[in-house]
Image (cartoon, rainbow, N blue to C red):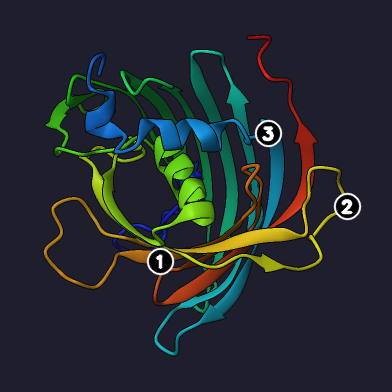
């Protein structure tokens, strides 16, 4: 699932990753599957466990640093992960409100729709967001080692060797939850910003058990905490742009996301869950 991150002035909110947790994350050409997915058979094993679903998360401010003006964050995120036969479809909608000590409030609306071919040959994304009254709309298609953006700005970026798309990245993390290794760094392209792929360094924690946040047949006692560090494209500093913890089940359902921007931390906790059909494949 892709995250929403504040802008340079920390007022703007990815995709659920990676898948996009992811997103994400959580969210690259015919004949180049091995180039983008280091272990295609492993990713296939994790994919067999995925339960397509629609989820709603509630956002709350968890903590702030002494130097931040942010005093409140609230809102909701709707996330949908579909099995579209030849590919994975992921839709995310964010509605977030930021409150500042000065009394100013900033509202952010973001719609992020992606499709990723299961063979790694193609990835598309459409972004429509409004940050404090400033609307931005664009689309991107990635294939054959490059990403082509269209909209108010038209740009083409080469993707670094080994780049992964968000769902492939999420599946790789889930595979490591069961069999390791637990440290994983790779460039991931999700198309949520007009830029090339960015580095995500992940640490997959050991299995934990605990009561789920909601009662649902798809909720399991076991989950895996995953710590992700996100670095901007072409970043040279060793400190990540932001960090995220995801409590992820093997079926692809995330219990909670905790996003640390340094100046403040936002938690997104699962509130509603609906299973979707498998696409009739």
Q: Where is residue 79, by image quadrant?
A: top right
Q: How far from the left and from the top, in percent, is residue 227? A: 45, 65
Q: Is residue 35 left or right of residue 52?
A: left
Which residue is nearer to you in this view: 12 or 60? Answer: 60
Of tags 1 and 2, the one toward the viewer is 2
Q: Where is residue 156, by image quadrant?
A: top left
Q: How far from the left and from the top, in percent, is residue 166? A: 41, 38
Which residue is nearer to you in this view: 9 or 93? Answer: 93
Secondary structure type for disc 2: loop
Residue 88 in view in this figure: yes
Q: How far from the left and from the top, in percent, is residue 229? A: 35, 63
Secondary structure type for disc 1: strand
Residue at the outermost top position: 281
Q: Which residue is labeled 2 in the image? A: 215
**Disc 3 residue crowd, few under 14, some 14–19, many 20+, Cα 10 Å:** some
Query: Disc 1 to disc 2, how far (Cα)?
Result: 28 Å
Reading the chain from its start, which is encountered first: label 2 or label 3? 3
* Quarter the C terminus occupies: top right
Residue 14 in view in this figure: no
Secondary structure type for disc 3: loop
Q: Is residue 215 left or right of residue 36?
A: right
Residue at coordinates 41% horizontally, 62% vertically from top-left? 182
Reading the chain from its start, which is encountered first: label 1 or label 3? 3
Query: Disc 1 to disc 3, how far (Cα)?
Result: 26 Å
Q: Which residue is labeled 1 in the image? A: 243
Reading the chain from its start, which is encountered first: label 1 or label 2? 2
Q: Which residue is labeled 3 in the image? A: 51
């Amino acid at each position: 699932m892709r995250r929403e991150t504040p802008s340079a002035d920390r007022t703007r909110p990815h995709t659920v990753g990676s898948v996009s947790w992811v997103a994400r994350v959580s969210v690259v050409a015919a004949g180049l599957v091995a180039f983008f997915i280091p272990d295609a058979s492993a990713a296939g094993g994790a994919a067999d466990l995925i339960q397509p679903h629609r989820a709603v998360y509630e956002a709350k401010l968890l903590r702030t640093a002494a130097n931040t003006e942010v005093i409140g964050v609230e809102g909701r995120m709707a996330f949908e992960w579909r099995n579209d036969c030849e590919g994975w479809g992921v839709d995310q909608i964010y509605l977030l409100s930021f409150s500042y000590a000065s009394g100013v409030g900033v509202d952010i609306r973001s719609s992020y729709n992606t499709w990723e071919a299961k063979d790694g040959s193609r990835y598309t994304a459409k972004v429509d967001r409004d940050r404090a009254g400033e609307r931005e709309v664009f689309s991107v298609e990635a294939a054959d080692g490059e990403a082509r953006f269209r909209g108010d700005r038209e740009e083409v970026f080469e993707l670094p060797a080994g780049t992964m798309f968000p769902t492939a990245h999420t599946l790789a993390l889930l595979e490591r939850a069961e069999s390791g290794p637990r440290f994983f760094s790779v460039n991931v392209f999700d198309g949520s910003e007009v830029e090339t792929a960015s580095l995500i360094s992940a640490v997959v924690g050991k299995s934990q058990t605990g009561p789920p946040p909601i009662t649902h047949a798809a909720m399991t006692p076991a989950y895996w905490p995953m710590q992700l560090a996100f670095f901007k494209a072409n970043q040279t500093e060793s400190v990540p742009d932001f960090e995220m913890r995801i409590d992820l089940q093997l079926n692809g359902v995330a219990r909670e996301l905790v996003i640390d921007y340094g100046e403040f931390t936002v938690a997104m906790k699962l509130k509603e869950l609906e299973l979707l059909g498998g696409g009739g494949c």
